[in-house]
Image (tube, rainbow, N blue to C red):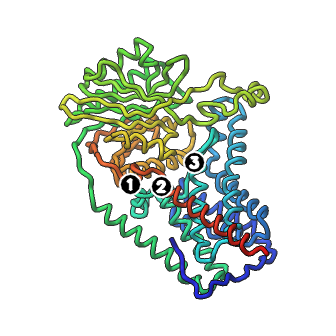
Amino acid sequence: MIAEEIGSKTEPTRTVPPRTPWGLRLALLSGLLLWLANPPAGLWPLAWVALAPLVVSVLRARHFAQAAWRGYLFGWAFLGPLWYWIGLTISAWTGSAIGWIAWFGLTFILAGFFALWAGVAWWLDRNVPEQWAVTALAAAWVVMEWARTLGPLSMPWAQLSYTQYRFLPILQIADFTGAYGVSFLMMLVNGALAYFWMGRDQPLRPRRLWAACTLSVMVCLYGLARLQQHDVGPSLQVADLQTNVSSYQTPSPATQLQIMNHLAMKAKAHAPAPQLYVFPESASPYDPIQNPSGYLFFQQLAKTTNAAILTGAEIYAKGADHNAAVLFAPELAHPQVYFKQQLVPFGEFIPFRSLLSPLFGRLFNFPTTDLTPGRHGRPLQTTLSNGVSLTIGPFICYESMYPARVRSFTRRGASLLVTISNDSWFLSRAAMQQHLAAVVLRAIENRRQVVRSTTTGITCMIDAEGHLLARLPINQEGFLVHPMCLLHGQTPYVRFGDWFVGLCALLLGGLFIVQTWKRKADQP
């Protein structure tokens, strides 16, 4: 934590800032800068300064509501252009304007998280000791990012740390703190820059900025050292398959199976032959459990290749439809199934359907049924023909945005992480890149290698330090064959979860209690 001793215990009076026409403009500027720091522009160094104008704007607000309003407008300037593809995707899928309603609704609601942070930041600046101000702002940002993972409308897309997915040294600390630790550090630098810019707290200005920059350099040095280390384990030859089947131009079931078989046979000719074949989300046109044609196809493919086959499919089980990952293997008497737990709002289910359907269902062509989330996140297990035990942590598409979901597989013994996705829905390469950024963080947090199979891109393989080992071009049919290490052991993040978020919340709670106690003590 950045805290400096102050010679006098008397807190200086913080005056109400003068009115300024630049307050809203600074907030909007911050939103646009942070958008540019994310893909597709990918100007990741901008993220280290992008939020400084927002902090200045918020702290110069005259009251809580004004600060919150500026944070809310920042949220619109950032999220609106960032995920414009939500409108394109859902509208194309439903054939109605519901996509743009979803885009507006999600942005309208989720921009509120930034409004809440801005209001809290304004309060902290005026109430906590000066030496804790910047640290408290960064802690509040972390708690806000974590809160975005909660609830039926949760959309933790484009967390601050994800902007750095190509700058691996700064990300290595995530095996201790999770991605939230990187976000904290970046907000710390932005906050220190903002205070330096405003000329606040003269004795602390240079020391605060120096401390934030020094801490960033130290984290980078740890990252550089960690990148020189390479975890070792048994090697597994994996075929990562990209079918290039678009959700908007889906061929017949027979053609889809032909594509899958063709890719598998081409990959089988590779020497050494793959021991695991991974197909994308929704790759199977049939329910491979209930439908005999689908079941026989994958059982036969597993026998022909003498390998394990993991495929995405929609499965009907226990009276409900599920998005699933299914594992076939010659050594398995019955296929193993994982049901997706974190569904996409307005994509795989309609939030608050009982309320929204009577009002908008017919107008916007709502899907008649929702997918049902799974209840358990157990790894998939098999023993390969060479006697190697394989434990897969499968997570499907949107679940890559939820570090706690992925962590649960590693905690339960997964030695390899596999994520399958159908990103052809997106109609945007920007969304594909934004999605990939989160997967890089999941590899580092868990110190597991990751196989990522998608329908149209971005199909790739990632090592435990976040490097892309291999990658296929977007919108092309193809496959990768690459050895992947089966790793064991647990990082501090896997063992203790979001402890860093808890620490940030504890700091904020402690500061609030102390300030409340001081106010009561000062009352006559």
Residue where numbered disc 1 is placed: 492
Tell me whether circle 2 and circle 1 mark residues in contact (CB < 8 Å).
yes
Residue where numbered disc 2 is placed: 499
Taking 314 as reference, is 241 above or below it? below
Front in this rendered view, residue 449 or 212: 212
Identity of the residue drawn at 33% across and 28% down: 309
Could one spot residue 72 in this view of the protein? yes
Front in this rendered view, residue 122 or 337: 122
Question: For the residues carrying marks 1 and 3, which lies nearer the camera in this image?
Answer: 1
The quarter of the displayed image where residue 370 is located: top right
Tell me which numbered mark, 1 or 3, is placed earlier along the sequence: 3
**CA distance separating discs 2 and 1:** 9 Å
Q: Residue furthest left?
A: 386
Q: Quadrant of the C terminus?
A: bottom right
The answer to whether 478 appears left or right of 313 in the picture is left
Kind of residue indicated by mark 2: Trp
Tell me which numbered mark, 2 or 1, is placed earlier along the sequence: 1
Residue where numbered disc 3 is placed: 156
Can you give x and y, in whole percent of width and height, for residue 432 in the image?
51, 45
Kind of residue indicated by mark 3: Pro
Is disc 3 surrounded by few (<14), some (14 to 19) or many (20+) residues within 10 Å? some
